[in-house]
Amino acid sequence: MTTASDHRSGFVTLVGRPNVGKSTLVNQLLGQKVTIVSDKPQTTRTEVRGVLTRPGVQAVFCDTPGIHKPRTLLGERLNDTARAALADMDVVLFLVEADGPIGRGDAFIAEGLPKDRTVLVVNKVDRVGRDRVAEQLVAASGFECDEYFPISARTGDGVDALREHVLARLPEGPQYYPDDMVTDVPEAFWVAELVREQLLAVVQEELPHSIATRVTEWEWPRIRCEILVERDSQKGIVIGRKGSVLKQVGTAARAQLPEGAFLELVVRVDKGWQRQPRALDRLGY
């Protein structure tokens, strides 16, 4: 960790309801993929840090689970993770949607945010017209945030201006991570997340929350990844007819790994793991 009187640095947390585009925005801000994305709510289950380093400044962007009304112990822990990530943050990016109502869930999140350090981000402006964006900005003004930015994390519209604004707000501080480091996510965790991302893209709507993934063996180039489901009936869905789903998932995940990687996928039933403290501890949630 280096120090310099003319160097600025800080931590930037992204918060919001599930599926507002936090992970997509983190990847867009960094210019590369460091966290998985999906159209399924609660895709992000842990705090993921992405590092942007430029001459004289370093920003650490913290992606967090969407804050929601929990139905399981897993949901409660996801909320706890998101709130804990707000501690000692230099900037908070509070995301709301341009194409959805700003409601009680957003207001609940806003109540716990530091107004003088919170930037309100209206995401998904590519889905609506200018009048709708203006309406959302007016509605969000009631949260009394420090600044307001309309953007599209998917297309990148407005993200450059947001990035420069965030960097300009960072206080004087040391460089926390090496120049070439873009995330602090361990490799094994990243591979497990890639597998889960591909599963979310193909499985049925009710199944995503019942899926967990973890790497159980790593002897490069061989990687063994375990896929957990909660019921026996879900195991067949994840495997697919004659292994078709596993094959599709494995091929897509392997394409994002270094050449030569051998990825073995194994499906196991762990009944009710979302509600079992020991299972959640084992999975790192």
Image (spheres, rainbow, N blue to C red):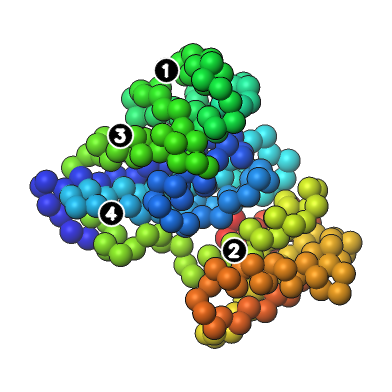
| Label 3–label 4 contact, CB within 8 A | no
Label 3 belongs to which residue?
Answer: 165
- Crowd rating for badge 2 (residues with CA inside 10 Å; few <14, some 14–19, many 20+): many
Sequence-wise first label, 1 or 4 = 4
Position of residue 239 in the picture relative to residue 108 (left or right): right
Q: Amino acid at mark 2?
A: Leu
Q: Could you say whether the residue bearing mark 3 is in a helix, strand or loop?
A: helix
Q: Nearer the viewer, residue 215 or 284?
A: 215
Label 4 belongs to which residue?
Answer: 53
User: In the picture, residue 180 is in which quadrant?
Assistant: bottom left
Q: Amino acid at mark 4?
A: Thr
| Label 2–label 4 contact, CB within 8 A | no
Location of residue 17 in the rendering, given as x and y in whole percent from the top left corner:
59, 35
Give the quarter of the figure containing the C terminus.
bottom right
Sequence-wise first label, 1 or 3 = 1
Label 2 belongs to which residue?
Answer: 194
- Residue at 60% x, 73% y: name it: 254
- Crowd rating for badge 3 (residues with CA inside 10 Å; few <14, some 14–19, many 20+): some
Mark toward the viewer: 1 or 4: 4
The vertical placement of 132 against 175, above or below, is above
Give the quarter of the figure containing the N terminus.
bottom left
How far apart marks 1 and 4 lie (CA) works out to 30 Å
Sequence-wise first label, 3 or 4 = 4
Q: Amino acid at mark 1?
A: Glu
How far apart marks 3 and 4 lie (CA) works out to 15 Å
- Crowd rating for badge 1 (residues with CA inside 10 Å; few <14, some 14–19, many 20+): some
